[in-house]
């Protein structure tokens, strides 16, 4: 336990010395962009049909890490769909003169 506390202290000191905020927005954004690039490399076919085929392959895998990635992908898809539906509803309400 002492070793882990020392390691944590050294890491915190090193991060502070470099001016790194571990949870900074820039770090989070950079990490998210890295995940995006890994998930969707430039040379990959990202047509809807190809993406659904890869998602289907991922979701039918027996590996627990693939099942977790499948669940995460569907959560992101459902969240994006809900945001799209909300935006469409807001646009429809605005076009009819309805405000909240």
Image (tube, rainbow, N blue to C red):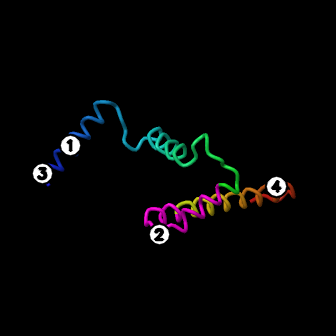
How many residues crowd mark 3 within 10 Å: few (<14), some (14–19), many (20+)? few
Which residue is under mark 3?
A: 2
Give how far apart the Cα atoms at labels 4 and 3 are. 60 Å
Per the image, the residue denoted by label 4 is 94
- The earlier-in-sequence mark between 4 and 2 is 2
The image quarter containing residue 51 is: bottom right
Q: Which-is-in-front pick, marks 4 and 1?
A: 1
Q: SS for tag 1?
A: helix
Please report the residue visible at 32 percent of the width from the left and 30 percent of the height from the top.
Answer: 18
The residue lying at 48 percent from left, 39 percent from top is: 30
Residue 62's label in the rendered image is: 2
Give residue 38's position: percent from left, percent from top: 51, 45
Q: Which mark is residue 9?
A: 1
* Earlier-in-chain disc, 3 versus 2: 3
Q: Gap between marks 3 and 2, in whole Å?
A: 39 Å
Q: Residues within 10 Å of mark 4 (few under 14, many from 20)?
A: few
From the image, state whether disc 1 or disc 2 is nearer to you. Answer: 2
Disc 2 element = loop
Q: Indicate left or right for 62 with 83 as reference.
A: left
10 Å crowding of disc 1: few (<14), some (14-19), many (20+) = few
Q: Is residue 68 magenta?
A: yes
Q: Quadrant of the C terminus?
A: bottom right
Mark-to-mark CA distance, 4 and 1: 54 Å
Q: Earlier in the sequence, mark 1 or mark 2?
A: 1
| Marked residue nearer the N-terminal end (4 or 1) | 1
The residue stretch that appears in magenta: 51-71
């Amino acid at each position: 336990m002492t070793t882990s506390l020392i390691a944590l202290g050294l890491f915190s000191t090193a991060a502070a010395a470099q001016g790194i905020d571990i949870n900074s927005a820039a770090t989070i954004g950079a990490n998210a962009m890295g995940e995006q690039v890994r998930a969707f490399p430039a040379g990959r076919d990202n047509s809807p049909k190809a993406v659904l085929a890869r998602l289907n392959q991922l979701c039918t895998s027996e590996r627990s890490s693939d099942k977790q990635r499948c669940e995460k992908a569907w959560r992101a898809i459902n969240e994006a769909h809900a945001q799209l539906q909300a935006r469409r509803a807001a646009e429809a309400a605005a076009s009819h003169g309805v405000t909240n």
